[in-house]
Amino acid sequence: QVQLVESGGDLVQAGGSLRLSCVVSGRNFSRNAMHWYRQAPGKQREWVAVITSGGGTNYADPVKGRFTISRDNAKNTVYLQMNNLKPDDSAVYYCNAQIWWGQGTQVTVSS
């Protein structure tokens, strides 16, 4: 049984920062690319960032230069550092590996 558990979501003012965490259990974490997605109310889920098994990263244009994805294979954890947050970043953030998803963590950015 594979489980992904996100945490770190919160209410923050515009310009603030948050760090999301996703702990993966039940699978060989280090061999998998890990993704972050987000979904705002009334919108489709959108891809945010990826980190490969080798540590390569890529970001969606709206978050480039503000978000940083990283991983700690010893802790089976992937992180999303979010800086200079904007109200448009408000969404439920989900961690993904292949077909497995976490339950999401809510990020709300007030203006």
Image (cartoon, rainbow, N blue to C red):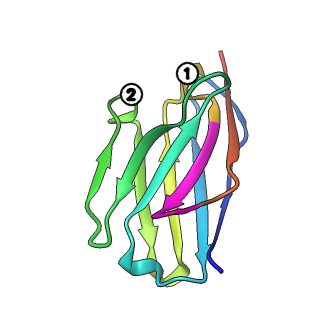
Say whether residue 93 is magenta.
yes
Residue 88 numbered mark, or none: 1
As shown in the figure, which amino acid type bears the numbered disc 1?
Asp
Residue 64 spot, x, y in % from top left: 33, 35
Which residue is rendered at x = 61% and y = 70% of the image?
23
Residue 47's image quarter? top left
**Is mark 1 in CB contact (under 8 Å) with mark 2?**
yes
Please, is residue 36 above or below residue 67 in the view? Answer: below
Residue 77's image quarter? bottom right
As shown in the figure, which amino acid type bears the numbered disc 2?
Pro
Say whether residue 101 is magenta.
no
Residue matched to label 2: 62
68 left or right, relative to 40:
left
10 left or right, relative to 20:
right
Q: Which residues are magenta?
A: 92-100
Residue 96 spot, x, y in % from top left: 52, 58
